Amino acid sequence: MPDSPPPATNCEEALVQLKKFGYAFDGAGVLRKIDPATGEPGKEPFSYNVSDDPAENEKHYQNLANQIPEIVYALLEKNGLSRTYIPFNNPPERSSFIYSQPAKLSQSKKLLVLIHGSGYVKAGQWARSLIINNSLDHGSQLPYVRQAQKLGYDLLITNANDCKRFYNGKDNPIKEVDTPIDHTRYVWKNIVLPSKPESVAIVAHSYGGCLTLDLVDRYSDFFKESVFAIAFTDAVMGSPQAKNKDYLCDVTCDWVASNSPLDTPVSQSKNGIRKISAGHTKHEWTSYSAIDSVFKFIEEKYEQRSNKK
């Protein structure tokens, strides 16, 4: 099997590379093998096993997966979101970026922030494996984007794993946003806080729980004043500072992997955050499985906030 190219740098390139691997997304967002007779997506889904060599199978998977971020970025833009490069003083080619709607946030009446987990996922993704093996809707944040737009939310989507750029013959960390924690802190300090949103909700998956609790501890006053709902999906997190425990117990719920039906109480965590079933047994499925319950929770919290004013 020949060597494959590095990650695509734009959507068209990514789609071309997918086609070279013999795949394309169909109209329903499912990755299909291309039908040689038509050159269009056929009925066969993605297959991990392309060789008798396990190393070749994994290499093929990773090279194909490298094309996913640009495709998702393009779909975010198609859905009305805009890219903002960070840190602000860097040239774009040596910067990371986030997505938002509107392009420049300002005094949002309702703002929804989406924070992905660790690993290979980038802005707009919850689970790369689900995008490849199931569909774009199963593994991306696009269903959350569309529902938030229907409900009148402004949007901000983090890109916390996008921490380096290749130049001068090597990978270089992007200063000021070179770790996921630094990324989310920079976004909060330089984009969220200056925009002075009226009401903020957060949905965070997996390690996004740690990133969110770090923000709560760092910007406690803002959170207690403006962040009315925090929805975790099978979050990875430590214990918050004692001064924030009561606040978090009031505004937070964690939808966890479980074999119980959706919304079944599972347990109370050691930090007091309520845990309920996401309606699926697998970690990577929790955001997709729990979406309706998550938005019901957020909207109920928003109504409670509005009634207090």
Image: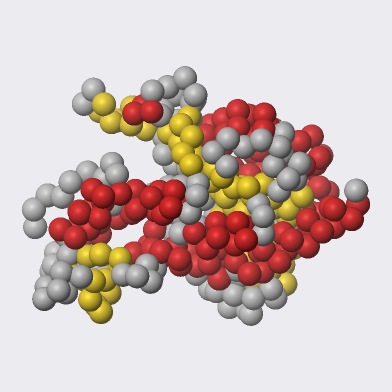
Among the 4 quarters of the image, the one containing residue 132? bottom left
Q: Residue furthest left?
A: 2
Q: Residue at x 56, y 48 (%)?
A: 115
User: In this figure, what is the number of numbered marks?
Assistant: 0
Q: Is residue 239 visible?
A: no
Q: Position of residue 253 (x, y in %)?
A: 71, 59
Q: Is residue 247 visible?
A: yes
Among the 4 quarters of the image, the one containing residue 33? bottom left
Q: Residue at x 23, y 71 (%)?
A: 41
Q: Position of residue 129 (x, y in %)?
A: 38, 62
Q: Residue furthest top?
A: 89
Q: How is the image coloured?
A: secondary structure
Among the 4 quarters of the image, the one containing residue 185? top right
Q: Residue furthest right?
A: 308
Measured along the vertical axis of the image, is residue 146 above or below residue 224? below
Relative side of 281 to 222, left or right: left
Relative side of 126 to 260, left or right: left
Quadrant where the N terminus sits is bottom left
Q: Position of residue 184 (x, y in %)?
A: 56, 37
Q: 148 or 286, which lies in front?
A: 148
Measured along the vertical axis of the image, is residue 32 above or below residue 120? below
Q: Residue at x 19, y 60 (%)?
A: 19
Q: Residue at x 57, y 50 (%)?
A: 114
Q: Position of residue 242 (x, y in %)?
A: 79, 41
Q: 242 or 30, which lies in front?
A: 30
